[in-house]
Image (cartoon, helix red, strand yellow):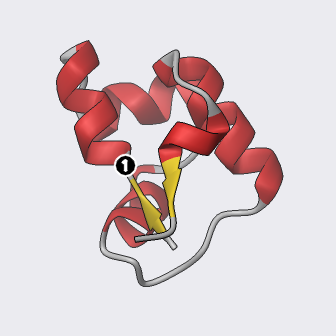
Amino acid sequence: MYLRIEDACKLRKLTLKDLSKLSGISVRSLEWYVKQERQPSLKRVERLAEVLEVTPAWLVSWE
């Protein structure tokens, strides 16, 4: 699974630090997700999608 976190942040002009503050998810966890070192829970994917104003389906790419 590949998360489009960086793409969505660029569209919204947010840094991972900004996203962390808005989502309540630590910067370190976000870095793990971006680097594909860890997989977020469905609840976290939904929260990130909400904050980034995208659908969970868009955020999660299976490519």
Q: Position of residue 36 (x, y in %)?
A: 40, 78
- Does residue 42 appear in the picture of this structure? yes
36 in relation to 8, above or below: below
Camera-side residue: 56 or 25?
56
Q: At label 1, which amino acid type do we have? A: Arg
2 in relation to 10, above or below: below
Residue ID at (25%, 45%): 6
Residue ID at (52%, 15%): 53
Q: How many marks?
A: 1
Q: Quadrant of residue 42?
A: bottom right
Relative horizontal placement of residue 53, taking residue 24 as reference (left or right): left
User: Is disc 1 placed on a helix, strand or loop?
Assistant: loop
Residue ID at (24%, 39%): 7
Residue ID at (50%, 43%): 59
Q: What residue does disc 1 label?
A: 4
Label 1 Cα neighbours within 10 Å, binned few <14 / some 14-19 / many ≥20: some
Camera-side residue: 14 or 8?
8
Relative horizontal placement of residue 48, taking residue 21 as reference (left or right): right
Furthest-front residue in this view: 63
- Does residue 24 appear in the picture of this structure? no
Q: Quadrant of the C terminus?
A: bottom left
Q: Position of residue 50 (x, y in %)?
A: 64, 21
Relative horizontal placement of residue 59, taking residue 32 as reference (left or right): right
Relative horizontal placement of residue 35, taking residue 58 as reference (left or right): left
Q: Position of residue 27 (x, y in %)?
A: 40, 51
